Every structure is written in C-alpha cells, then in structure tokens.
Image: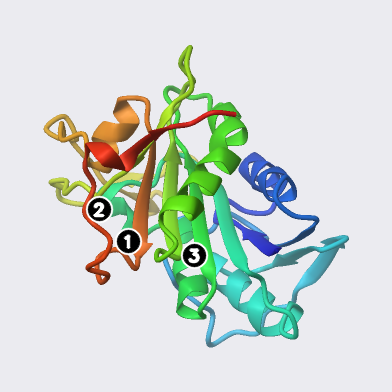
Amino acid sequence: MRILVTNDDGVDAPGLRVAEAIAAGLSDDVWTVAPSSNRSGTGQSVSLHEPLACIQQGPKQYVLPGTPADCVMYGVGHLLRDTPPDVVFSGVNHGANLSDSIMYSGTIGAVLAAEHLGIAGVALSQAYRGERIDFEPSRRWARTALHTLWAQQDAVRCWSINFPATLGDTAPCLRIVREARLPVSQPRWIADRDAQDPRQQRLTFAYDSRHVTDPDRDIAALRNGRVAAMALRGARSDPNIPGPSAAFEWPMRG
C-alpha cells in the first residue's frame, strides 16, 4: 500500500522519523510531506489565502510551510494525485492527544483531512512523563496495534492511537476507548519569559483528569498502561460496531 506521512511538530521532529520507520515496516512506498515548523494546535486549519512553496528534501520527502492539513491536501491533491495514498499516518506526536484536546490537535487534524478525502488515517501519539520523551513504546508496538485494528474494525477508517509513556515487563494490551470529558479551567495567558516585548503572552490551559477512572475512557486506559485506540470517524454512526467493553481489549504480541 502507499502511505503518506505527516505530523504537526515539524519536519525536524524526532517523532516524524519514528512514523516513517513504522510506515517503512508496512510498505516500500512511503512518502512524507511535513510542515516546515511546529504547527501544533492548528487542528484542521488550511491555508486558503496565501501561496505555499513546497521544497523537496530527499527521495519521497517534502517540506511545506503550512499546516498538517495543508500537507495532506498537497500530498493527495498534487504530489500523489494520479495514485493517491491508501492511508495517511500523522505523528508520532510529542505527547498524548486525549479527550477534549483533540479538537485543537494538528496531528488529529491531518487524519481528519485525509478521511474527508476518502482516505484512511491514523494519528499516532506518544505519551511521556517529566521532561524526556521515549518513543520506544510507539516504535515497538505501532505496527502490531495497526494490524490488530485493521483486522477487527474494518468499518472504521480513521483512528487516534496513544501509546503509554513506558513499557512494562509484558506486552501491553490494545484497548478501544472513548474520549473523556474534562473540566477545562478558564484559559490563561501568561507572560512569555523569552520575549523582548513585555506585552507578549502565551495561551495555556489547565486540566484535571484525576476523576477519570472508567477503563473505557482514553485517559484511564493510557494511565493503566494500555495502548489506547479511539475511532475518530465511523464507529459512532455505524450501528454494527458495538461500544467499548472488556471484549474490546486485545493482548498484543510481537
């Protein structure tokens, strides 16, 4: 199959290299179109009012000064127009994409853009604790998770998969989850310590997820060491796909 890879952390992000390696383990026809800089928080935003110049960086590797959704549109509508990709991988994101925050995520926005064009999409995100991120869980278990999902849920074409921060002594389980609803505090604007202009501020949010204990919710599943997979499109509108339950958890081997 033909795979198009993108992300929202930018072309130089280490997670993009991980996603390319995951794709290369599934296909020898892998293309990359990634944003030239970090475009986190752009959702499904597209650049309608400014021209974009795409630059080829290597064989089948391109850089676009736009959003993740722009990258998908360029890959599908121009670069691979004659033979579109079968699936779009977005990530591997630096940090989890969970619950209410997915509406802002550029990682999620890329695969929703793909699904809108009739192409399957998979968002890959790596959780972490502290200051250091370890991509080993996603690097080791992504292909197994994808094979499991594709075998069990053919009707769903668009997924968000979050990998736990650390690997346990045994293989993790893959759990089908739903998003949790989080009480988001009032948005806060804080002074940018690196800015020369004291008027410059940064937007922040505060979340409290301690109340989320339902194992079928994405936050709890990830906290419990599961690989958490959520259907972004398809499952909610298809009555033949039941909701998550204990039966919607599979041990992974590989």
Q: Secondary structure at mark 2?
A: helix
Residue at (44%, 62%) from the top-left corner?
Answer: 154
Residue at (24%, 33%) from the top-left corner?
Answer: 220
Disc 1 marks a residue whose amino acid type is: Met
Where residue 103 is drawn, which disc sits there?
Answer: 1
Residue placed most toward the observer, 61 or 53: 61
Residue placed most toward the observer, 84 or 66: 84
Q: CA distance from mark 1 to mark 2?
A: 6 Å
Residue 72 % position (x, y): 60, 71
Where residue 100 is drawn, which disc sits there?
Answer: 2
Mark 2 surroundings: few (<14), some (14-19) or many (≥20) residues within 10 A: some
Q: Is residue 168 left or right of residue 182?
A: right
Verify CB contact (< 8 Å) between mark 1 and mark 2: yes
**Is residue 137 in sight in this rendering?**
yes
Residue at (64%, 47%) from the top-left corner?
Answer: 19
Residue on which the image places disc 3: 111
